[in-house]
Structures are given as structure tokens and as C-alpha cells.
Image (cartoon, helix red, strand yellow):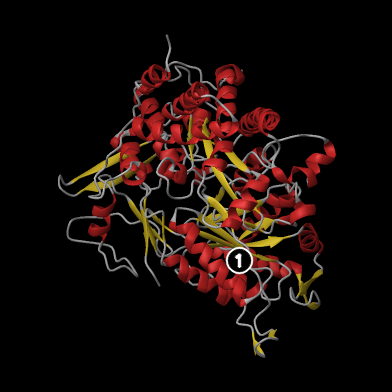
Amino acid sequence: MTTIASLTDTIGAIPITLSSQAEVVAKKRYFLKNDSNEVVEDAPAMFRRVADAIASVEKQYGKLDIDVSLTSNEFYTIMSNLDFVPNSPTLMNAGTKQGTLSACFVLPLEDSMEGIMKAAHDTAMVQKFGGGTGFALSNLRPKGDRIKTTHGISCGPIEVLKTLSRVSSMITQGGKRDGANMAVMDIHHPDILEFINCKAVEGEIHNFNISVGVTDDFMKAVKAGTNYPLINPRTKEIVEELDARDVFSKIVYGAWRNGEPGMIFLDAVNRDNHVSDTYGRMIATNPCGEQPLLGNESCNLGSINVANFFTETQFSDSSEPSLNWRESLDWSELGKVVKIATRFLDNVIDANYYATPEIEAMTKATRKIGLGVMGFADLLIRLRIGYDTESGRHVGKTIMGFIRDVADKESEKIAEERGAFPAWDTSDYAESGQKIRNACRLTVAPTGTISMLADTSSGVEPTFALAWKKMNILEGETLYYVNKYFQRDAEKYSFYSDSLMDHISNGGSIKDRSDVPGWVKEVYTTAMDISPEAHVGMQAAFQDACDSGISKTINFANDATLEDVYTAYMLAWESACKGITVYRSGSRDKEVLVKADSDSQPVLQGFEATYDELEEACCDNAFLIEESGCVTCKSCGWSKCHIA
């Protein structure tokens, strides 16, 4: 007779193999520790803890114990196979009875002292348990505006932003990482020029990304070369007009200078706002920009490793692209995982701990989830299809469209069992008669550490580098870390050499090498080899089938011009993307730190700790980068920021 215990024992016995890098990530970030900071979990225990906690929600909907156990085993299986991994707060906190399970939050920021202090308080509570926060500064009165109650004048949104930054600097997210934030300001705000320039000095407001929220009308004014109005949010009156093309050029210059600000295309965002009649427009996003939310909404994310659904039992023996690439994917298994992951994420909403009652009420009203992908670049490599090709974009659009269709149907099925999201009655879904459980289903997140855990490429980004090097101080030798697929092919097709590894680990491109076959150069295109237009094209391909946003960095070479950035920003809007973030290589003072020998250490501005001390706090394979006042390890994702 099959019992609940025997089912759990059988599933729990499935071996889980993490890569050495993933094991480091898990020990540093995810495995539970005792009071002595000793690791007391392994991968099977972690995934079982999470699966049981999220499956227990089934009892709230009348399921029997045997059904709960079966659901837990389904959750456990897709996680332990690394086919699906939920966002970091869920891995950290599920089953512990403490901490949020969601990664993404937008908090309202009202134009009053009480509203500002409420936002500061809620920020601390959210980030204390591992969440990242977004804010819209758009409703705050401009600098110098009158304050009726005190007969004073307003300090302005930028000073409020700096205050929130200082609050965030005191908080470590979930005890594991520094707070992360996004600030958005509407293009029509009178202080927009100050906002565009507020991060011109590197290291200032270091724990906030900033983006300008623009409308279709503004972008049309840019193209036409006409003026547009600045509007005081307090009085709703036009106070000035600016040249749209001139303001857009200032945004472009900031992005060219150091990657700030990004842009959020607010009309595109709100075309997928199904509850706008009840709750108004979405005017802010989470820290990485992929999840637009209403004030006090949160969203839990999870990502499917699409590289795992390549059907070859071993690495492809062919150097030719998959002409019939659809036959190389296990669509049936992918669909199964999408269904289970959709139910998992819906359950997280009920299993969650919420930092404030307002966040709980708003999140449960719309029940937004964010199912996305990772491993896409690895999948293209296995298919022998170049990332920067029309075929590559077609693969992305097709896969995301498939995931959308399956997730939507599963959300409808859950709605039949449990009811539609509570705000459904006043949503545009009610007008069409589509009963659905979750107001939004899809989000493509950056998957920084969970892609390391799954040993796959991050999000929908291309491969960033094929190899990098680190000096082994104790042995006095250089160690090369190489993309696993590239190393297999280099050895199989006999073009591996120390000379090649040295070339590419120092930033060189394989496109410059005569010893690398032509098909390898196409298949193994890296981020810096891809044109900005191709980057935007891939983002647009995924956005076409995604009801939330896409986390994607548009990479530029150092010699990129202002016109190049201008073109990319305009192309992103024209391609119906919901936002854009660019980065020009070398545009920040501190990027990559490599220890040359045991007698020299790079200077870490703003840090009391030395490089060695930071490295020791990180992991055995530490490869640290410093950027905008923060040090991050490319090996395990550990990070630390100095407090300005």
C-alpha cells in the first residue's frame, strides 16, 4: 500500500547534484544555519522544506493529506531537478515561519510628512525580511513648493529619495544582502531635470536604481521635436514647458555616462493593468524594473530553466544549427513544469508573511505572480543558434508564448477551483468573461543567484563571458573559469589552448581569433559582441508574450556614442518594450578588481575592509567586482555596500 510517508521517502531519495559553485551559493545564501552560524541543511532538505511549506496551503482549499503530499512531491521534483527555482526569499524563508517569500514590492509615497515616514517605515520592514522596493516620486510636490500646514517650503523629491536611501543603507535584506530599490519619476514632474542628474556622481544614492517614467505622448514629442508640459502634482497645473528632445537627450547622456537613468514606458506598462479602473495606474516597478506594481502590491517570482528541456541525452554531436529546433525540446515536460510552477507561485501568496497589513490586502486582491525563464542563452548554445540572430529571437518568442498559454490556462483552472482574484469583479477580465486566478502571470527576472544555483545562464541575457581568470595566490598560478559548453566544444573540436583562454579571459573576443571555427563564433556570441539593436530585439521578442516586464541590460562597448544610446532608447519604445536599461562598458570608475600578486591590493573606496577581508567573507572562488560603492562576487553572488 502506498502511504504518504513512503511517497515522501521515495521522492526525497532522488539524488540532487549541485555544481561546486551552486553549493557555495546555497551554503552562503539559502541553507538554514543554527545559532552558531553552522549550516544545518543540504539541497534535498532545503527543497523539501520549501515544497512542504508551499504545498501546505492546499489544506486551506479543502485538500486531503494525501493530495497535499502529492502536491509537495510535485513541487519538490521540479525544484530538485533544477527545472524550476523560486525567488530567493522563498528559498530562504519558506517553512521557517519568518520572513517574506516575495522579492518584489512597490510602496506608495504620498505627499505628506506622514506619507513619507510611512514609506520609510515600510521600507525597513520589507527589506528586513528580504524584499526589494520600488517607489514613484511623481506625486511629491516639487522643490520650493509651499507647505500650507507649516508655512514652509518643500525640500523636494530628491531629498526624500536620499532619506529613503539612508534608511535602506541600515537594512540588510533578510540578513543576507543590502537593500535594493528603484525610484521612478514621471517625465512631467517639475523636478525631472534634477532627478535625471541625481546619480551623476558615482556612489551617491548607491542602493537605488533610477528610471524616468515616460508616456507615448512624450516620445512622440521627442520624435516631432516639440515642447511638452511640466505639471505640479499638487495643483495639477502646468508650470513650464520644456523641449522634449532636449530632455530626452539629457536622459540619454546620463545613461551613456554611467547607466542611469533607465526608462519605464508607462503607457505600455498600463496596457496590462487589468484593475486600473479600481486602483489607478501603475507608476513604479521593483528594483530591477521587470515587475510593474501598484502601491502596496508585491509579487513572488520563479524561473524555469529552459535549457533543461533540450532533449538530447548528451551534448550535441553536431556543429550545425537545429533546423527543426522544435523537435529538440520536450514540450510536454515543459508544459507540465509550467503548470506545477504556476500553482506553486499562487500558493506562495497564501503561505506568505507580509510586512504590513496594507501589502497583504493589496497582494491578495490581485494575486499577481511572476513566472519567468532562465538558461535561455545556454539553450541557444545547445541548439547551435546564435543569440543575435533572427532565429534566436524566434526561439525566444515561441518559448515565451508557449509558457504564457500554458500558465494562463492553469491560472484559469485554479480560478475554477478556488475563485478568481478578489479584484476580478471590477477588472477588465470581468468585462470579457475570462475568469482567472492571477491578474498577471509572467515576469522575466534577472535570476542572479538562482541561476547560479541551477548552474545555468541568467534570465534571458546572453552569455556575459566565455572565460575569466583569477590568480591563485597560494600556488602562484592563474586559474581559468570557462563556460562549460564552450570548454566541451573547444576540447572536442581541438581549438582549446592556454593562449585562447588568456585572450578571452582578458576581455578579448573569439571573433578576433583565426583558430576558432566560424560556427563557434556565431553560437558563442557574448554580450559585448551583440549589437544594441539585437539586444533590444531579444527583449522585445520576450516582451511580446509577457504580461509584466523583462529584466534585460542593453550592453554597449566603451566607444559607443550618444547617438547609439539615443537609438536604443527610441527602438525600445517603438518595439513595445516596457522599459530599458543600458550599460556602456567602462563607464564607471570601479568595475573589475583582479589581484595581481600577494603584495598588491586594489583600493576599495569607502570600505574599511581590505580586499582580502572581503574575499574571505565571501567564498572559496571569490571573484569580486566593485561598482558604485558596492562589492559583489561573481562566483556566489555575495555583496556588500559601504554606507556613504
Q: Nearer the viewer, residue 86 or 129?
A: 129
Image x and y of residue 360, in percent? 59, 51
Q: Which residue is mark 1?
A: 253
Q: Is residue 581 above or below residue 17?
A: below
Instruction: Tell me: 321 left or right of 449.
Output: right
Q: Is residue 415 left or right of residue 508?
A: right
Which quadrant holds residue 565? bottom right
The correct choice, above or below, for 310 with respect to 51 in the image is above
Residue 356 position in % (x across, y down):
55, 58
Nearest the viewer among 249 and 420 is 420
Residue reaching furthest top? 1
Q: Which quarter shows the C terminus?
A: bottom left
Query: How many marks overall?
Result: 1
Q: Nearer the viewer, residue 429 or 397?
A: 429
Closest to the observer: 319 or 406?
406
Q: Is residue 477 above or below residue 288?
A: above
Image coordinates of residue 270 in percent, x first then y, are: 74, 51
Extreme-bottom residue of the structure: 151
Q: Decide: is 48 above or below 609.
A: above
Residue 379, position as x, y percentages in the image: 51, 29
Q: Secondary structure at mark 1?
A: helix
State whether residue 614 appears in this view: yes
Quadrant of the image containing the N terminus:
top left
Q: What's the amino acid at mark 1?
A: Tyr
> Which quadrant of the view contains residue 21?
top left
- Estimate how packed mark 1 is, as few (under 14), some (14 to 19) or many (20 or more) residues with alpha carbons within 10 Å: many
